[in-house]
């Protein structure tokens, strides 16, 4: 699935004519989502449009976003109705009226039979108002906590799981999020960015999603977008420093131990890496850090067909298995253990093997049939 220029024009028209927007992000947004969100907020602020996050932003490490970017995303509040709710069962209301004079609005409640007291009155927020909802990386509409169906939604995503559920669907597995936003945030499909300062976070998004240009799925149009953003004033140093993943020292030490315990089959181009309970103890890390270790291993062994990380816990041997999407689709039908598909290229097997050797033998036999 890929987006058309007609869809881009429609989405641009909605962004240009609207005044108030809501931005929906995944529950755990990746760096590329956050950088694209910053680009949207910067552009809207420059055009004196209002934009706010639909849901509160989860905790962000300060080495991901610039402090001013964090403030930009967290300070904006969505416009909501404000309601005064009266318990009329306890205190019936005979009349409701309001008076508006100069800069003051007075709401007047006339009780019917007994005095009104503060304990029968409460204040609460009501519906959110927006000209459009921009959903960034939300592949399933059930994940969008916005009740109104009358507000148009711009569905922006790169996931193959996206069901094209939006009013407008700017969805493509062939493009990076930064590419899509770069196309959207222009004065016209072939014109310049509406706000040049958005070029830096857009470039950071591309850098983050491509693992610093080390993924095997890089395209010519992606490099064209990068070149265009650079020409439009993107700050290369800021984009690289923010878009490059960093980890605590202990994670790098854990990664080093996994590398020491690695095996590479140069004929089948398969890598097996291992972490013992002692490795976690020596580095002061836990099994929760294995995903970060796996990310580093993937970047190290991109030239291989598959990469497996086994780790030991008190309840068994778990594993991450990474490979090209086509191979992963074929492999899923052959797995003997329950698994979780993290991404189309990454599978998680929890407590699936009694020993390292048995896990290696089982996955080796399956992987070798695919190549």
Image: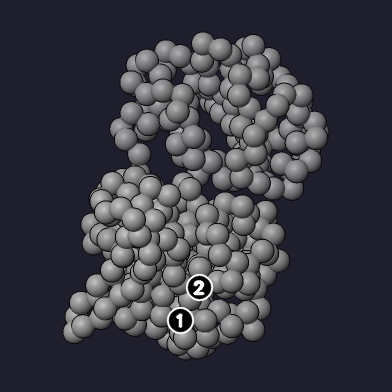
Q: Residues within 10 Å of mark 1 (few under 14, many from 20)?
A: some
Relative side of 281 to 172, left or right: left
* Residue shown at the point (46%, 24%) measured from the top left: 287
Secondary structure under the numbered disc 1 in the rendered image:
loop
Q: Are marks 1 and 2 in contact (CB under 8 Å)?
A: yes
Quadrant containing the N terminus in the rendered view: bottom right
Q: Can see residue 200? A: yes
Q: How is the image coloured?
A: one colour
Relative side of 107 to 158, left or right: left
- Residue 276's spot in the image, x, y percent? 48, 16
* Residue shown at the point (34%, 82%) measured from the top left: 47
Residue nearest the observer in this picture, 32 or 311? 32
Q: Residues within 10 Å of mark 2 (few under 14, many from 20)?
A: many
Q: Which of pointers 1 and 2 lies earlier in the amino acid sequence?
A: 1
Q: Which residue is mark 2?
A: 132
Q: Height in image: 318 above or below 172?
A: above
Q: Height in image: 38 above or below 348?
A: below
Tell me the CA gap for discs 1 and 2. 7 Å
Q: Which residue is mark 1?
A: 18
Q: Dividing the picture into quarters, in which one does residue 283 lie? A: top left
- Residue 34's spot in the image, x, y percent? 40, 57
Q: Dividing the picture into quarters, in which one does residue 227 lie? A: bottom left
Quadrant containing the C terminus in the rendered view: top right
* Residue shown at the point (44%, 70%) measured from the top left: 129
- Residue 199's spot in the image, x, y percent? 37, 73
* Residue shown at the point (43%, 49%) measured from the top left: 89
Secondary structure under the numbered disc 2 in the rendered image:
strand
Residue nearest the observer in this picture, 155 or 231? 155
The numbered disc on residue 80 is: none
């Amino acid at each position: 699935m890929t987006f058309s220029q007609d869809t881009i024009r429609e989405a641009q028209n909605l962004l240009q004519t609207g005044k108030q927007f809501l931005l929906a992000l995944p529950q755990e947004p990746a760096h590329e989502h956050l950088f694209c969100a910053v680009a949207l907020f910067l552009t809207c602020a420059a055009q004196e449009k209002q934009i706010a996050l639909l849901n509160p932003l989860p905790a962000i490490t300060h080495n991901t976003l610039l402090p001013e970017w964090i403030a930009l995303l967290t300070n904006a509040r969505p416009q909501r109705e404000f309601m005064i709710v009266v318990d009329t069962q306890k205190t019936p209301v005979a009349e409701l009226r309001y008076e508006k004079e100069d800069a003051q609005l007075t709401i007047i409640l006339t009780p019917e039979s007994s005095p009104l007291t503060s304990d029968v009155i409460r204040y609460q927020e009501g519906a959110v108002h927006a000209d459009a909802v921009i959903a960034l990386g939300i592949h399933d509409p059930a994940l969008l906590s916005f009740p109104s169906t009358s507000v148009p939604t711009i569905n922006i995503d790169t996931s193959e799981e996206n069901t094209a559920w939006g009013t407008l669907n700017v969805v493509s597995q062939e493009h990076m999020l930064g590419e899509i936003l770069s196309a959207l945030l222009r004065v016209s499909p072939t014109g310049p960015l509406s706000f040049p300062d958005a070029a830096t976070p857009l470039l950071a998004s591309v850098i983050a999603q491509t693992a610093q240009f080390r993924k095997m799925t890089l395209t010519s149009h992606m490099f064209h977008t990068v070149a265009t953003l650079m020409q439009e004033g993107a700050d290369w140093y800021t984009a690289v420093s923010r878009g490059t993943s960093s980890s605590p020292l202990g994670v790098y030490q854990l990664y080093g131990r996994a590398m020491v315990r690695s095996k590479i089959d140069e004929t089948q181009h398969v890598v097996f890496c291992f972490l013992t309970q002692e490795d976690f103890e020596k580095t002061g890390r836990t099994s929760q850090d294995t995903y970060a270790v796996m990310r580093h291993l993937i970047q190290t062994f991109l030239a291989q067909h598959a990469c497996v990380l086994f780790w030991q816990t008190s309840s068994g041997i778990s594993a991450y298995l990474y490979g090209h999407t086509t191979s992963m689709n074929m492999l899923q039908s052959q797995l003997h253990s329950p698994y979780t598909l993290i991404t189309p290229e990454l599978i998680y097997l929890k407590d699936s093997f009694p020993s390292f050797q048995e896990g290696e033998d089982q996955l080796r036999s399956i992987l070798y049939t695919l190549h």
